[in-house]
Structure formats: structure tokens, C-alpha cells
Image (cartoon, grey):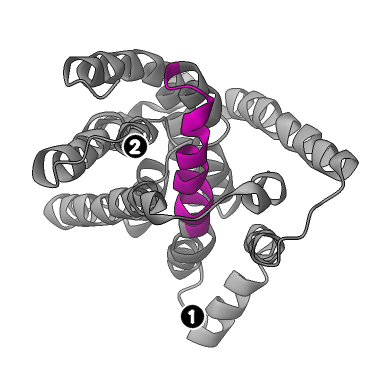
């Protein structure tokens, strides 16, 4: 998906807000769950799992169609900014660093950095960025092929998540899940609203899209990577398996709030 969308992005001053929002939400997640971990003596893997799954939203697979439906196609430019240089870049750099730190504490800093640069999604990001910078136009057939391949990822990922959910055995994760979804679906968009609308006085479409993207369910790709590294796989799958259906209702509430504030 990154090789399809990133070459089409136009970077300008309005791009700062959605990009900054993604990084701000992740930073807030890190601080929020680090504090809770200190307060409640949580295991490191639980903390890292929540930092990543609650700090990174589903800004593309779910975000793009939701933004196009609620805001219009003109909002996709900002949604792409929130996703590609935002959540996706965070996952492939800081997110992967935290994951490797939690699973391979004996690895050297050089080995960890090497792993980041050799991480396939990060390599795809660099390629997409170069295509954008040099103004290379990909053949339409190649673009459509990339989009078609990307379109199969989300349904397969959701199907896989559904298979991994085992409700009778998951009750021990409910307290962690509650805090995770509280931050992702309520606190993250609230933080975004307070920073850009209340404090900065911004009211443009980039602010509206940023708030809605901050309110999206947890990122599927992030949860899959967390589960792949065996960092509380059950909790990671619950975050998206339960978070995605719940986000339908929370997004409706945020849509109503933004309408009342005149942002929609």
C-alpha cells in the first residue's frame, strides 16, 4: 500500500498537522502506558504491546474509506499524511525498536538499527519516498497491481485475528484491554482536539481529518507484528478484534462532536 500512496502525496505546510498528530498520539501512548506500568507494576511486554497497539491507529485500511465517506475525497490527502509519514513510519522505526528491545534485550544498538533498516515495510517507505522526491511516474498497470495486492491484506488479517481470539481464556487481559481501548478510542482523539482546536485555534480540514484519524481503531499491521514477535499476542489480537467493532460507535460519537463544533 505504501508504494501506491506515498508517490502520490504532495507535501505542504498543511501536512504538518496530520503528521504531527500521529507522532503526538504515539508519544502520548508511550507516556500514558509507561506511567500505568510504573503505577501497577505491569510486565514490559504488556506495556510495549499497549504502547504500540493503542498508539498507532488504523489510518489506512479503515481510515481512508472512513475519511472519504465522512469528509470527502479531498480529505484523503491529509489521511495519507497521517498514515505514511505518521503511523506507518512510527511503526517501522520507534515501534520496531521497542519491540526488539522487549524481545532481544541482549542485542546491540547496531544490530537493532540494522534490523530497522532491513525491515521490509521500512525499505518500501524509503523507495516510495524516493519515487515521490524524484517525481517518477509509475505505470498505471503497476499502480493498480499494487493497490490490488494491498486490498487483500486487510480482509486476510482480520480473518486471521478472528481465528486467534479465544474468549474463555482471554479474561485475564480485560483490564489491559480496557485501558488500551480507552486511550485509543477516547483519549487520543480528545488530546488531538485539545491541542489543535482548543489551544492552537485551528479549524481547517487537516484538523478534522487528524481528529478522526486519531479516533480510528488500533492498527492491524502493528498488532500483527507485535503478535509475530510474541509480545502478548492474545492482547494484541483483542485490541483489534474488539477495538475495530467498538470504533464504529466511538467514531459516530466523534463525528457528532465535530459537527457540533463546526469542524464538519
Note whether 89 is above or below 228 in the view shown. Answer: below
* Residue at x 23%, y 41% (from the top left corner): 192
Res 258 → quadrant: top left
Mark 2: few, some, or many residues within 10 Å (few <14, many ≥20)? many
Q: Quadrant of the N terminus?
A: top right
State which region is magenta: 70-89
User: What residue is shown with label 1?
Assistant: 106
Residue 67 badge: none
Element type at mark 2:
helix
Report x, y in % for residue 47. 32, 52
Regarding residue 98, the answer to whether it shows in the image is yes
Q: Quadrant of the C terminus?
A: top left
Q: Are marks 2 and 1 in contact (CB under 8 Å)?
A: no
**Disc on the earlier residue, 2 or 1:** 1
Mark 1: few, some, or many residues within 10 Å (few <14, many ≥20)? few
Note whether 108 is above or below 81 in the view shown. Answer: below
Numbered circles on residues, count? 2
Is residue 3 found left or right of 190 in the rendered image? right
Is residue 89 found left or right of 243 in the rendered image? right
Q: Of circles 2 and 1, which is in front?
A: 2
Report x, y in % for residue 120. 70, 61
User: What residue is shown with label 2?
Assistant: 214
Regarding residue 232, the answer to whether it shows in the image is no
Report x, y in % for residue 248. 40, 15
Note whether 258 is above or below 75 in the view shown. Answer: above
Q: In this orientation, which residue lies closer to the viewer: 201 or 187? A: 201
The rendered magenta stretch, by its main secondary structure, is classed as: helix
* Residue at x 67%, y 53% (from the top left corner): 7
* Residue at x 58%, y 32% (from the top left corner): 61
Element type at mark 1:
loop
Magenta stretch: residue 118 in it?
no
Is residue 204 found left or right of 133 in the rendered image? left
Amino acid at each position: 500500500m505504501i508504494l501506491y500512496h506515498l508517490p502520490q502525496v504532495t507535501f505542504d505546510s498543511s501536512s504538518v498537522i496530520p503528521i504531527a498528530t500521529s507522532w503526538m498520539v504515539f508519544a502520548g501512548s508511550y507516556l500514558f502506558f509507561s506511567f500505568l506500568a510504573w503505577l501497577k507494576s505491569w510486565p514490559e511486554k504488556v506495556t510495549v504491546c499497549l504502547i504500540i497497539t493503542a498508539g498507532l491507529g488504523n489510518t489506512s485500511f479503515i481510515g481512508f474509506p472512513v475519511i472519504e465517506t465522512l469528509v470527502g475525497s479531498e480529505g484523503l490527502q491529509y489521511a495519507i499524511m497521517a498514515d505514511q509519514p505518521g503511523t506507518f513510519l512510527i511503526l517501522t522505526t520507534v515501534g520496531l525498536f521497542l519491540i526488539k528491545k522487549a524481545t532481544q534485550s541482549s542485542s546491540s544498538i547496531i544490530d537493532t538499527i540494522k534490523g530497522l533498516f532491513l525491515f521490509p515495510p521500512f525499505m518500501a517507505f524509503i523507495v516510495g519516498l524516493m519515487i515521490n522526491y524524484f517525481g517518477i511516474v509509475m505505470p498505471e498497470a503497476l499502480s493498480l497491481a499494487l493497490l490490488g495486492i494491498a486490498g487483500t491484506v486487510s480482509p486476510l488479517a482480520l480473518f486471521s485475528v478472528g481465528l486467534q481470539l479465544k474468549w474463555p481464556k482471554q479474561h485475564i487481559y480485560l483490564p489491559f484491554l480496557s485501558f488500551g481501548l480507552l486511550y485509543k478510542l477516547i483519549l487520543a482523539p480528545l488530546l488531538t482536539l485539545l491541542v489543535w482546536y482548543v489551544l492552537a485555534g485551528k479549524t481547517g480540514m487537516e484538523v478534522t481529518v487528524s481528529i478522526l484519524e486519531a479516533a480510528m481503531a488500533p492498527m492491524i499491521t502493528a498488532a500483527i507484528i507485535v503478535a509475530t514477535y510474541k509480545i502478548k499476542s492474545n492482547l494484541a489480537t483483542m485490541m483489534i478484534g474488539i477495538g475495530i467493532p467498538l470504533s464504529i460507535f466511538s467514531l459516530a460519537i466523534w463525528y457528532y462532536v465535530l459537527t457540533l463544533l463546526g469542524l464538519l
